[in-house]
Image (cartoon, rainbow, N blue to C red):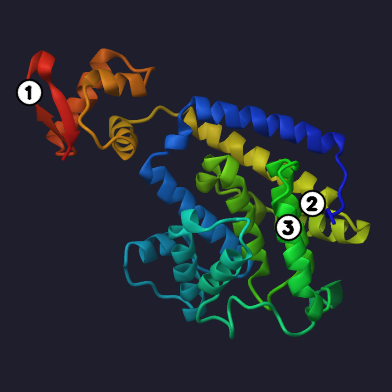
């Protein structure tokens, strides 16, 4: 059965806005995100998603862990970061409609943190905020059937991916299939679902906006619980995605440096190329700028120059 929700004017407004922004992102070749920005966004994603769950490490400490530097901090927090890095390293291998991959991702994410990671819970759970029981999850006996139904729903091609990703996130949080790690799995899996149609979401750290206003996140979950449908949560998450895309586009309006252009180009092209190929890739730059970029890249030993004058070609060093 399809999970309950309504299409509201707010949802329609954000679907339109997000679709327009994704078109603008693609037009600006932001899908060819430079490696530096990709790394920064991955750090932001991991930091934000884990900080929502109480992790105390800073972005600087997470960067140090990526660079194999020694970090002083709670052992549990460091393990959480290492596990998250492992998941994001393999994110393109995970299939969002595959329940086995979902369990494998949880196993990676919670490795050495809980007993039996990657297994659905075998006991009842409730979520307590302060002294108040905020949510009582369905009985553990129902979890395998409810999650199976949710993955059947994910395969429904008549549903918009933007909405489907929000519905899955909310319904998974409601079912609360694991003893720990439900929040980070919900956010990870929504990203993965979105990536299938919109690869830019691999580089879009919308968790940062959630982390900056966690109260609104939990309020949207609570409102949907009370109403028995995910409408409010869909509205909230679409607003977050829309804002994240706005931030990305604002960042993209800053001019790329020659080093960033070369890094983007080489990531997408490993064959021999000419200055004309380079200019076709970056249509907004002049021939003088292209020549300067390539000359600097040769001097910095990023590329090698082959031939001379009209026969000049380049290849990755």
1 or 2: mark nearer the eye:
1
Q: Split into 4 quadrants, where in the image is the N terminus?
A: bottom right
Q: Name the residue under label 3.
A: 152
Q: Which residue is drawn at 41% across and 50% down?
A: 39
Task: Identify the residue at the far right of this view.
Answer: 227
Mark 2 lies on a secondary structure that is helix
- Left or right: residue 262 compared with residue 74: left
Residue at image x 30%, y 14%? 286
Residue shown at 32% from the left, 67% from the top: 68
Q: How crowded is mark 1: few (under 14 residues within 10 Å), some or many (20 or more)?
A: few
Q: Which label is found at residue 127?
A: none
Residue position for label 2: 233
Taking the view exactly as shown, the residue that stands out farthest to the left is 308
**Relative height, residue 11 to residue 21 (above, below):** below
Secondary structure type for disc 3: helix
Residue under label 1:
307
Q: Earlier in the sequence, mark 1 or mark 2?
A: 2
Residue 227 vs 31, above or below: the answer is below
Nearer to the camera, 76 or 212 = 76
CB within 8 Å, label 2 to label 3: no
Q: Position of residue 242 (x, y in %)?
A: 67, 38
Q: Position of residue 62 (x, y in %)?
A: 43, 63
Determine if residue 129 is in view: no
């Amino acid at each position: 059965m399809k999970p309950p929700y309504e299409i509201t004017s707010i949802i329609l407004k954000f679907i339109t806005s997000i679709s327009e922004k994704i078109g603008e992102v693609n037009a600006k070749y932001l899908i060819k995100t430079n490696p530096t920005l990709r790394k920064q966004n991955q750090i932001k994603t991991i930091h934000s998603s884990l900080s929502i769950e109480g992790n105390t490490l800073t972005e600087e400490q997470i960067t140090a862990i990526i660079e194999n530097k020694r970090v002083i901090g709670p052992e549990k927090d460091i393990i959480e970061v290492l596990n998250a890095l492992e998941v994001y390293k393999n994110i393109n291998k995970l299939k969002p409609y595959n329940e086995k991959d979902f369990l494998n991702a949880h196993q990676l994410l919670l490795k050495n943190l809980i007993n039996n990671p990657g297994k659905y819970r075998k006991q009842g759970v409730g979520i307590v905020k302060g002294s108040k029981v905020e949510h009582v999850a369905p009985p553990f006996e129902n979890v395998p059937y409810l999650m199976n139904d949710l993955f059947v729903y994910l395969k429904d091609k008549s549903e918009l991916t933007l909405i489907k990703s929000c519905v899955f996130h909310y319904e998974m949080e409601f079912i609360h299939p694991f003893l720990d790690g439900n929040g980070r799995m919900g956010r990870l899996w929504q990203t993965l679902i979105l990536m299938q149609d919109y690869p830019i979401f691999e580089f879009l750290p919308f968790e940062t906006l959630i982390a900056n206003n966690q109260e609104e996140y939990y309020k949207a979950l609570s409102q949907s619980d009370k109403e028995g449908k995910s409408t409010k949560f869909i509205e909230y998450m679409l607003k977050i995605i829309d804002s994240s895309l706005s931030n990305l586009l604002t960042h993209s309006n800053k001019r790329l440096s020659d080093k960033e252009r070369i890094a983007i180009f080489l990531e997408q092209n490993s064959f021999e190329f000419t200055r004309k190929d380079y200019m076709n890739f970056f249509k907004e730059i002049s021939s003088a700028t292209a020549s300067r970029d390539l000359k600097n890249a040769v001097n910095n030993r990023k590329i090698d120059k082959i031939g001379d004058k009209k026969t000049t070609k380049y290849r990755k060093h």
